[in-house]
Image (cartoon, grey):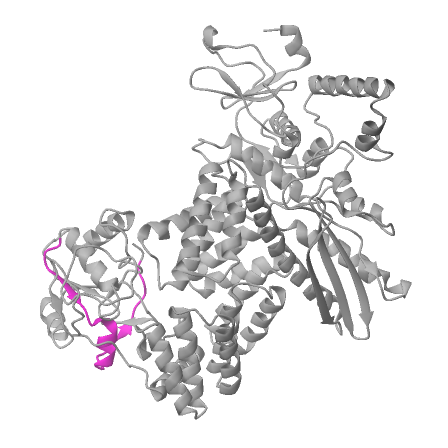
Amino acid sequence: MDENLLSHDPVLWFDGFRLDRRDGLFRKLDNGRWEPVVLGSRALDVLRALVEGRGALVSKQALMDAAWPGMAVEDSNLTVQISALRRVLDDGRATGSGILTVIGRGYRFLPDVTAEPPAFPADTMEPYAEPAEAPPIGSQPMAESIDRAGSSRRSRLLVWLAALLLVSVLGFGGAIAWRFWGSNQTLPITAPRLSIVVLPFQNLSGDPNEDYLADGMTDDLTTGLSNIPEAFVIANASARTYKGKAVDARQVGRELGVRYVVEGSTRRAGAVLRVNVQLISTETGAHVWSDRVDEPIADLAAGQDAILARMRGTLGVSLIEIEIARGRRAPPSTPDAFDLILRARSLRNQPENRQRFEEALSLYDQALRLDPSSVLALTGAAAMLIQSRNSWNGWFNAEDQERVKTLVARAREIAPASEEVLGVYAAWLSVETDCRQSMPAARRMIETYPNPWFGYGLLSNCLIITGRSEEAIPLMEKVIRLNPRSAGLANRFNFIGSAHLFLGRNEQAIAWLERALAVDPERRDDFGGGTKRKLAAAYAHAGKDAEARRALAAADKDWPFDTVRGHFPDDINPAFAAQVRNYQEGLRRAGGRDHAEEDADFGVPGYAILRSDLVGYTPAITPGAPTIRTTELPRFIAERKPVIIDPLTYFWGQSIPGAVGLKNAGIGGTLSDRAQERLGRKMTALTGGDLTKPIVAVGWNSERFDGYNLALRLVALGYTNVHWYRGGREAWEAAGLPETELTPQDW
């Protein structure tokens, strides 16, 4: 080992890695050999600055200066490099990320750093060696003009330039030299995915005093696109150098190293601002997307915000779809994590169904195996699981529920203030707690990021279930304006129609609900049935009885498991409870079924397997747990004093007197999962360890598996006197038996 070389090019050691100023980063393998780690030179520059900080806070500006000296780039580019470093350094690390984010300030490098090499056996030490070849520029997370990894690379570049000059002197290289260099061009580069520049918008009004509108649109759209995860956006300062010039998109792409150029124009006509925008491929010069927005601007700031939010949303979706199509034409032999994330996003941008959900979740899972620290993959997988819980009537199993909790916690640890993390955290709170906790999280998202349609949607949903539908409607209308091409547009229309129904505006409810069905006419699950059911209630209240009966028949065909009593206020709020009772009355007028039949024999055999889908026809008996009927239960409770467990499905604050509320205790999964372990501990506390203690498992009704699953779990825990109340809380209510308020317990 050349000691003189080390004195000039010091090496730093940490966590089984060595960072050499000359040769880059190496990882020590189990066999004692050192393997070069492929990282772009920008990432290496950021890593050196962090490592040399030795645990001290390194500001964002210092890191930007280290990686992009003298250049103006968006902050999101630094986030890309930090993500690339975490992908490499955190692989196999058991104690969280080695790079700590200090919100709003910078980063700290947590592993111990030393300038002295660790004590390795002599026969495993190898001299520093050049990697077999430099990583291709196209594989780096950022477009780069020249590889600046160290002096040896600079030497190689100088040799290459000398050779090129020699060729030109001999008479063969003049054209080649001009092609590569020109009067003001850099080396040709391979542009990263989702790389874009917003060129200065043109003011077509003919009034120079209106230039500020075009300039403001350019600057704000650049900022908005920078918030698209993993997007590489050229800074305004560089883009402005093209102002007033006739440019060719392909030349811009070569000069700036981007795949896409955004061009646009503004024209103010009275009270309306018209914005035209085009997305152009720098590879072909072809226009691949365009849009036009006309927005009333009586309130100029609000009008511009609405236009920019819509453009950011639709342009962001279009970029993803275009990149997916590009990947299909030339698929990578080994897709990386971001390839997989793009594919998953593409599926999420389409109307939802179970097959697309499973495919998207599988892609996010694959991405996480490649990059366990990817915030986009963590939040994407969590969002898919939360969406499945909302769309298909509860968690599939306890593992999904636990996994979402873990995914959200991991994402919050890595990037707690990112838009994706704030959004998925608010969504998690909305399904696991209530609006008292999720509303503040949604508001924080709205305050932190301009016009996040998802945040407005969550807030709007909470407003409606707290009896404030009047306030919820304009927020959901704003969601539609911000994200007009969303695959969930039918859900938005359905939501507004529901709000009008709750407010007693039946004609307006009918109009919005019919729009929802027109957007997604083929959907035949609970969503399609639910929209038609609300339409039936609105028709009934409007005196259109024939239309109400037809809508209800169509709803029952789509989803036959509905009952009037199954519609309940999600939040214990008097105003919303009154609105829901009005909805229930409309369903009754349309001929809706009040409750499920407790003693119905659906011909389903009993089996000791938990059902992940909680909706369906239950068996009449449960292995190891006799069925108890409504007519028998009051006397059984009075005489035997059982422990009554209610898993709180379709719960709005009341239950059978004396019941213990254990939310999601009837979830699917396996009889050896973590939910089973937690339930065992809780039941030991409730029964004092007496396995002969009488227990009643209460579900919702005979067409839900929550009570059935709970009974199976209790029997598997060894309890010998378990009874399944098949009719459930719905049958108890239908019989007019008393209920008392119930507060869920921790378990």
- 217 vs 393, left or right, is right
Quadrant position of the N terminus in the picture? top right
Q: Give above or below for 298 relative to 416.
A: below
Q: Which residues are magenta?
A: 719-745
Is any part of residue 468 visible from this angle?
yes
Depth check: give the residue in front, 724 or 721: 724
- Name of the residue lying farthest toward the bottom: 543
Residue 195 percent coordinates (x, y): 67, 44
Left-right relation of 637 to 541: left
Q: Nearer the viewer, residue 257 or 600?
A: 257
The correct choice, above or below, for 194 with respect to 703 in the image is above
Location of residue 533 (image quadrant): bottom left
> On screen, 418 above or below 614?
above
* Residue 722 painted magenta: yes
The relative height of residue 462 versus residue 35 in the rendered view (above or below) is below
What residue sits 69% from the left and 44% below the top?
A: 259
Q: Position of residue 559 (x, y in %)?
A: 34, 72
- Is residue 741 found left or right of 418 in the rendered image? left
Residue 305 image position (x, y, % from top left): 70, 64
Name the quadrant containing residue 601: bottom left
